[in-house]
Image (cartoon, rainbow, N blue to C red):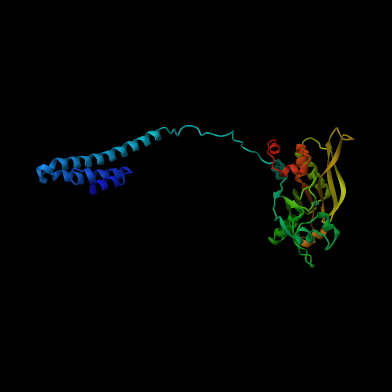
Amino acid sequence: DALQAEIDAAPLASGDEAEAFRVRFLGRKAGAVTALFGKIGSVPPEARRAVGQKLNALRQSAEARLDEMQSAASGASAEATDLDLTLPGRIPAPLAPGSLHPLTQTLESIQDIFAQFGFAVARGPEIEDDWHNFSALNFPANHPARDMQDTFFLEPPAPEGRGIVLRTHTSPVQVRVMEEAVRSGGGPPIRVIAPGRVFRNEAVSFKSYFMFHQVEGLVIDEGVSFADLKAVIFAFARAFFGGEPKMRFRPSFFPFTEPSAEVDVWWEDESLPGGGRWLEILGCGMVDPNVLDSVGIDSERYTGYAFGMGVERMAQIRYDVDDIRLYYENDQRFLRQF
Ligand code: PHE
């Protein structure tokens, strides 16, 4: 009876356990059941029949467990062969490969064009100090020109004017690039663009958002003139818009350029009186000597120009999208079109 209990309880899940089970109970030499059969001669003849029956039952129950285990195993392997690993996967819906965001595409074409003109790419932090965002750019302390930019302050402006801000334009990268050139002893010539996000505390509407993108440009060398600036802007516009876009330079003001200008392109729209309207795409000008002085570049020897272009505006003209908020809603119906 003890042996029967052992047979019933022995673990029998793997091939190894099946073999151990067979050796232990049914093995020809050391099997426990086999050994009992060998002793049947010593049982008194009148009890032999009953003992024989009991031993047979014991052997059968051991064999039955082995059979059971083996057929279960072969059933599992039959099931396993139903799995065809060469079948293609089942895809719930056609995979949408996605596409580059229209602003990314616009930014990439702007960068490609300026790369052909020999401009390197520079980057600066989105969290800026007052010095780079304002002071070094010739914004006088506590001057209303600072309010021009609807600044987000992370740390309020201290009395000495050292607040921490979300940069309101990419122009602080101009300062960083010039500082680095001076620090590394290289100095001018400098010829870079600086793409990136900028932030302004403006009410959100179809035409303004609290964040947008600019591409800054900066060229510093001996003998750089306003004619060079115009030539680069016109060449860029021809490459970006194609053909001969209708453009104008309009006098403007920025603390860090003198003279300063804004550039508009003509947006054709038959439904408007006059057949279209002017759209501003960038601010620009000759780098103010005060800016060169503030970073330690010799303003007697060097001159330069700078520009700052609005990427959303360039995308609007290219794709005919007139609500800036669409770029940030991530609506698939909008994004799929690009
Ligand atoms: N930083 C200016 C702006 O945010 C644009 C600009 C850049 C103007 C460089 C002149 C030179 O509007």
The answer to whether residue 110 shows anywhere in this view is no
Residue 299 place in picture, x, y as percent: 80, 59
On the image, which quarter does residue 168 sit in? bottom right
- The vertical placement of 108 against 145, above or below, is above
The residue shown at (78%, 66%) is 158
Q: Quadrant of residue 23?
A: top left
135 over 310 or under it: above or below? below
Residue 179 locus on image (x, y percent): 72, 60
Identify the residue shown where x is 25% and y is 40%.
61
266 or 39, which is in the foreground?
Answer: 39
Where is residue 81? Give x, y as percent.
40, 33
Rendered residue at 36%/35% (across/down):
75
Q: Residue furthest bottom?
A: 159
Q: Quadrant of the C terminus?
A: top right
Measured as percent of width and height from the top left, residue 316 is found at 77, 40
Q: Is residue 126 above or below residue 99?
A: below
Q: Residue furthest right?
A: 273
Residue 81 left/right relative to 49: right
